Image (tube, helix red, strand yellow):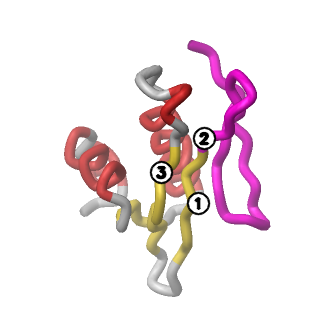
């Protein structure tokens, strides 16, 4: 599924609109150079399509590009990082 994920820097989130519903990942950055995903929100009407994974990957790709360490307060993002250890390895963790 092709998704056009956009970055709303002002609201600190990556989002995508599908079938009239908006899914998003909200984040914050810390002074210690961490990129923390706080929430991953996908409305049930568009769930089960890999949207959450695509949003989290896009967000962490951005973090790596900006040389920020990927971390997660969001339980979904924690599990995503566990399944993708290369994101910690990229940062030398």
Real-space Cα separation, disc 2 to disc 3, in angstroms: 8 Å
Counting residues from the start of the chain, the first of labels 2 and 3 encountered is 2
Is residue 13 within the magenta segment?
yes
Label 3, secondary structure: give it. strand
Which stretch did the figure color magenta? 1-23
Quickly name the residue at label 2.
Answer: 23
* Quarter residue 23 falls in: top right
Q: Quadrant of residue 75?
A: bottom left
Residue 12 image point, x, y percent: 67, 64
x 47%, y 28%: residue = 47
The local secondary structure at tag 2 comes to strand
Q: Is residue 84 above or below residue 12?
A: above
Image quadrant containing the N terminus: top right
Is residue 6 found inside the magenta-colored segment of the image?
yes
Q: Residue at x 36, y 67 (%)?
A: 73
Q: Earlier in the sequence, mark 3 or mark 1?
A: 3
Q: Position of residue 43 (x, y in %)?
A: 54, 38
For the residue pair 64 and 58, the one nearer the viewer reads as 58
- Residue at image point 68% right, 34% down: 21
Residue in front for this viewpoint, 45 or 17: 45
Query: Which of the numbered marks, if any, corresponds to residue 40?
Result: 3
**Image quadrant for the C terminus?**
bottom left
Q: Which mark is residue 66?
A: 1
Q: Position of residue 17 (x, y in %)?
A: 71, 32
- Dot 3, how many residues are within 10 Å of its Cα: few (below 14), some (14-19), or many (20+)? many
Label 3, label 1: how far apart the Cα atoms are:
20 Å
The mark lying in front, picked from 2 and 1, is: 2
Q: Residues within 10 Å of mark 1 (few under 14, many from 20)?
A: few
- In this rendering, the label closer to the viewer, 3 or 1: 3
């Amino acid at each position: 599924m092709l998704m056009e994920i956009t970055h709303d820097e002002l609201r600190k989130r990556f989002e995508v609109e599908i079938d009239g519903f908006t899914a998003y990942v909200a984040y914050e950055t810390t002074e210690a150079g961490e990129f923390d995903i706080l929430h991953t929100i996908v409305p049930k009407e568009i769930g089960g399509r890999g949207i959450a994974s695509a949003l989290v990957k896009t967000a962490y790709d951005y973090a790596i590009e900006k040389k920020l360490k990927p971390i997660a307060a969001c339980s979904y993002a924690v599990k995503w990082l566990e399944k993708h250890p290369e994101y910690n390895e990229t940062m030398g963790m």
